[in-house]
Amino acid sequence: MISTNILELLGVPSVTLIIGKRGSGKSSLGHKVLELAKEKGLSPYLLGFPEEKSMSIPSYITLTNSLDEIPDNAAVFLDESYMYLFSRESFSNFNKAMAKFIGVSRQKNILLVFATHLTRKLDVSCIYDADNLIFRQPSYLHLKFEREEIKSYIHDAADFFSSLDADPRRYAYIVTEKGVVKIEVELPSYWSEDISKSFSGISFGEKKLKQKYKPERCYKCRVRTEEYLVSGDTPFCFKCAEEIGNKLLWSFPKTIL
């Protein structure tokens, strides 16, 4: 076990994936890389970070939602990266732009770091171009469901974390082109509980399902319709209900899809 500057292991420029179960310390490690990158003269950028939590971030770190705003000689961290680079949206505009950005990141001298629970959730362009894999403690099911290409690494990482007597969040299992390194890592100096839960208030942009009545056949005209009234348990379309008038006691149906 060694304690060293993680940037010396990752190298600059490079593309790095931080992988591990929820709460294993992926976010704090990504922020630590930004803090160390600042000391090395790189410009730190947080990509996709919630603006409402910006007060928790030091002023020397720039928040952005655009790859075009990132200059040369920068360190970029994209936390919860599967939300922006989802594997099932490989042809989205952002996914395609990121693939191009990764392609020229070496020429731009960019240190690029992604954090995700599972690489299966992540666009393949981020995985195939990775120079380094950093494992935080994986869960048991990660060993079963991860991509075949990195299963051997994640099994070795799991063995390492299971052998520890100390808090596993203090350690990282790193696979680089030079080999495997196991290190002890520190929290960034500005770390807080607010940052660790920075994505708790985001909107997921889901489409709400439109409620509609279950289609029924009108008792009088026998036409099926989703818009109807009932008398007791007997359905009538609006047209027939109007013809019948107030002879029956009407109510809206209770069955909702």
Image: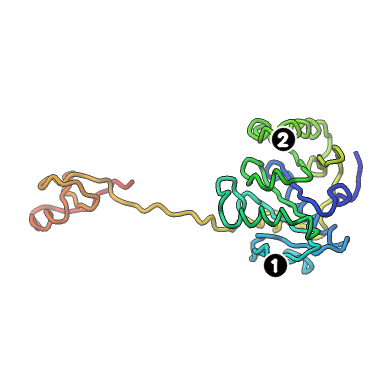
SS assignment at label 2: helix
Query: Nearest the camera: 191 or 203?
Result: 203
Q: Residue 35, how many percent across, how many down?
A: 82, 59
Q: Say what amino acid the circle numbered 2 marks.
A: Ile
Neighbourhood count class around disc 1 (C-alpha, 10 Å): few under 14, some 14–19, many 20 upward? few
Q: Say what amino acid the circle numbered 1 marks.
A: Glu
**Residue 62 vertical placement versus 144 (above, below):** below
Residue at the image position 16 percent from the left and 47 percent from the top: 223
Q: From the viewer's perspective, is 34 left or right of 22? A: right
Neighbourhood count class around disc 2 (C-alpha, 10 Å): few under 14, some 14–19, many 20 upward? few
Q: Residue 8, how many percent across, how many down?
A: 89, 50
Image quarter in which the N terminus is found: top right
Q: Earlier in the sequence, mark 1 or mark 2?
A: 1
Q: Residue 22, how many percent across, how many down?
A: 67, 44
Which residue, given by chain and number where applicable, does mark 2 sit on? Answer: 150
**Residue 19 vertical placement versus 212 (above, below):** above
The picture quadrant where one finds residue 191 is: bottom right
Query: Nearest the camera: 49 or 22?
Result: 49
* Residue furthest to the bottom: 59
Which residue, given by chain and number where applicable, does mark 1 sit on? Answer: 69
Question: How many labels were placed on the picture?
Answer: 2
State the CA–CA distance, disc 1 to disc 2. Answer: 32 Å
The picture quadrant where one finds residue 143 is: top right
